[in-house]
Image (cartoon, rainbow, N blue to C red):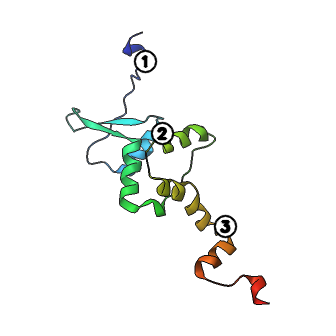
Amino acid sequence: MEIKDLMNPSVVTIEPTASAALAARLLSRHNVGSLPVCGEDRRLRGMVTDRDIVLRLIDKIGPDRLIFGTDFPMWSPKEELARFLSLGLDESSRQKILYENFMKLLKLHDEDEESTKRGDAHVSDRH
């Protein structure tokens, strides 16, 4: 089998001055993991991947402001989770993005745990 039998002949490119948000939309819309970056002369300048965008976003705004999500039912949550886990983030960042930030957003934290962190007495201790 040759590469020409595997390749996608409809190449979607992006210019170096385009936004990361546009790159993310193109990656999602065309179900690809990378985009060739081409100048106005259409010459290849580099590549940008979905991984590049996610890691830069985490570096820029921090893991405290992100929540993991998928495009279910369009894409498999299992595959999306595997891709996220392959980013090589530290355990603390993974926990924040996968679980803790979502719990904070929806205020679904354990009240006993929160009161313990604040040093409050348990409700039963107040009577």
In the rendered view of the protein, which quadrant contains the C terminus? Answer: bottom right
Query: Which labelled disc corresponds to residue 98?
Result: none
- Callout in the foreground (1, 2): 1
Judging by the rendered image, the residue that carries numbered circle 3 is: 108
Q: x, y percentage for residue 28? A: 48, 41
Q: Is residue 104 left or right of residue 65?
A: right
Element carrying mark 2: helix
Judging by the rendered image, the residue that carries numbered circle 2 is: 29
Q: Residue at x 63, y 66 (%)?
A: 106
Question: Tag 3 or tag 1, which sits nearer the N-term?
Answer: 1
Q: CA distance from mark 1 to mark 3?
A: 46 Å
Q: Which picture quadrant has residue 118? A: bottom right
- Callout in the foreground (1, 3): 3
Q: Is residue 77 left or right of residue 8?
A: right
Question: Tag 3 or tag 2, which sits nearer the N-term?
Answer: 2
Discs 1, 2 touching: Cβ within 8 Å: no
Q: Is residue 113 left or right of residue 89?
A: right
Q: Amino acid at mark 2?
A: Arg
Q: x, y percentage for residue 15? A: 28, 42
Q: Amino acid at mark 1?
A: Leu
Element carrying mark 1: helix
Q: x, y percentage for residue 51? A: 40, 43
In the rendered view of the protein, which quadrant contains the N terminus? Answer: top left
Vertically, is 123 above or below 78? below
Judging by the rendered image, the residue that carries numbered circle 1 is: 6
